[in-house]
Image (spheres, rainbow, N blue to C red):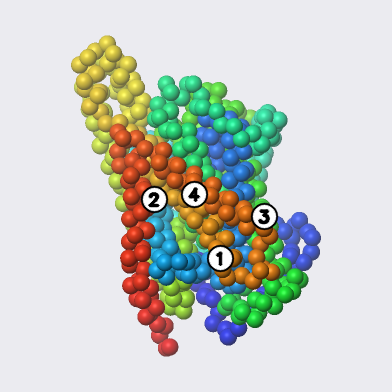
Amino acid sequence: MASESTVPSVARAELPPLPKALTQRSALGWVSLFGPGAVVASVTIGTGELIFSTRGGVLFGYNILFLFLFISLLKWALVFGTAKHILLTGIHPFRRMMELPGPRGWLIMMLLIMICIVQPIWMSFHSSTLGNYFALLTGTTSSLHGGAQFLWAILLIGLVVTLCFAGGYTIMERIQIAVVAGLMVAAVASLIMYSPDYIAMFSGFFTPVFNDYPAWIQAKEPDVFETPKWVELTTYVGVIGGAAFDYMAYTTWLRDKRWGYAGSNPPTESEIQEIADDPQHPARTWLKAPVIDCAISFSLIIIFSAVFVTSGVELLGPEEQLPSSSNMLGQQSEILTAVHPSLYHLYVAGAILTMFGTLYGTIEIGVAIVTEILRSFNRLWTNANRQRIERAVLIWQSSFAVLVILLMFNHVYNANKLAAETAYATPSSGAEKLLTDGADITTLIKSETAVASEDSTNAEVISAVPKQRSPKEIILNVLRPVNLFTGVLACGIFCFANFWIEKKTMPVELQSKWFVQFTYVFAGVIFFVLGVKGYWDNHDPDGGLLKSRWFSIIGICTVTLLSVLVVNRFRSWMERKTVDGE
């Protein structure tokens, strides 16, 4: 959990002295400021680079790097806007959002409900992906009819939650810096040793053209082929560079770093006016800290993206492979083993550390967001009860995540068990061998369908086997609606909020330059439109609840309406809470 310290109860704001890294031009000094950004980088590298960058390289080639670079720049502007406000005013953007038009606090009430739902689902995704890899390494991929990976996932959640109870923000930051540093060395070394087509890679950063899926996708990956191209691309928008809640948690962690006024009581209006009147005021110099921190963070993300896009373009693509349900992390190791087989162990260690760091960071982000939202309703009570609140959030997140994992386990186990019984009932098909080899239900269906063309009886049996039961399909189907909100739609909401907060609360002298304000609005429009389009296109009438556009759209509208209806009562309840001794 985050550090147990609370914001000091002092009568006036206190601005910490500037570190040498901000007063001297030194590259080494700038690196010393790398901290909260390491957490954001580690969280996004796990899912974005190891899995989706490789997948994007296979499907769209090096041109996918243009999308990664473009979205990273927009998200950098988003996180800088939120960090700038808390460093200059000591007030978190969540607190400012309390004053948006409508019932006071309705938006952050909606975000509170959403974080309690979506963050455990992200936990279930990260732990299941890592559990998939542990099942591969231990030879248990086909155990429990393909469901063993979910039991590994539950064990991993228990391990990470234990670490969260024992740790704090400082420990988390050190862990993530070590993980990112090690992976950076491995990634750059592997890229140099593999020697890809650097010209094609470089041109991909500046080529905004995304062709249709490769021809072989239709035959070998029918579920991917049926996914609209813009839904696939929007998924990358959500995972590359992090999600909206990551950036709000980043802003919260600046309190622990005590950068600017973030770790202090808010300055008065007269003190803020002093900052506005003095272009050389130390508070303004503090703004360089998140600029440097986030610049390093997003640069690392882009480098990692290039490395694993290369693995998709140069290795998996020519072999007509995607990261599969039985090997979601293992195939990417070929970018290292292609150089030398002994480097496989380096990849194994790096992949485990990366996904472990991602899972750890995801849990801490949920804790930070809930705590900060409650602080917006009642700062003194939340600070006084911070440890108890964080423990309650940890218990809720882990319990809900385990429930989601058990539901996915039940889904996969029962379907693959039915498939096994069907396969053994028709031994001439040879499908029993596929199951013994650990293939998932999608492979089984393809094999059985081929045999059924010669045997109508078998065709009738196989037609009864449910679709979309492989672990990969279930995990991604659960994740996609969540990712469209946290990684795309919510980013648009926060970009618009940045623009509104600056115009509403900041002196003109402290407002961002016109092109930065334009970026807030432009990014907000891009994220909002992509999010809405992603939800609309993510629709399959025969795909079940998770692939229905109406499930997602009605769900978000329902949560928003519920927030509007209950926020006044919730706010009154929070404001009545007092600290003992007051």
Amino acid type shown at disc 2: Ile
Circle 4: residue type:
Phe
User: What's the residue at 35%, 39% (across, down)?
Assistant: 547
User: Which residue corresponds to the image point at 54% horizontal and 52% vertical from the top-left?
Assistant: 524
State the separation of the CA atoms marked 1 and 4.
Answer: 18 Å
Q: Which residue is mark 2?
A: 121
Q: Nearer the viewer, residue 73 or 405?
A: 73
Mark 3 vs 4, N-terminal side? 3
Label 2, label 4: how far apart the Cα atoms are: 22 Å
Residue named by callout 3: 515
Q: Nearer the viewer, mark 2 or mark 4?
A: 4
Q: Earlier in the sequence, mark 2 or mark 4?
A: 2
Q: Is residue 24 visible?
A: yes
Q: Quadrant of residue 139?
A: top left
Left or right placement of residue 236 versus residue 426 in this view: right
* Residue kind at label 1, given as amino acid type: Ile
**Which residue corresponds to the image point at 33% horizontal and 55% vertical from the top-left?**
558
Q: CA distance from mark 3 to mark 1?
A: 16 Å
Q: Which numbered disc, 3 or 1, marks the residue that appears first in the sequence?
A: 1
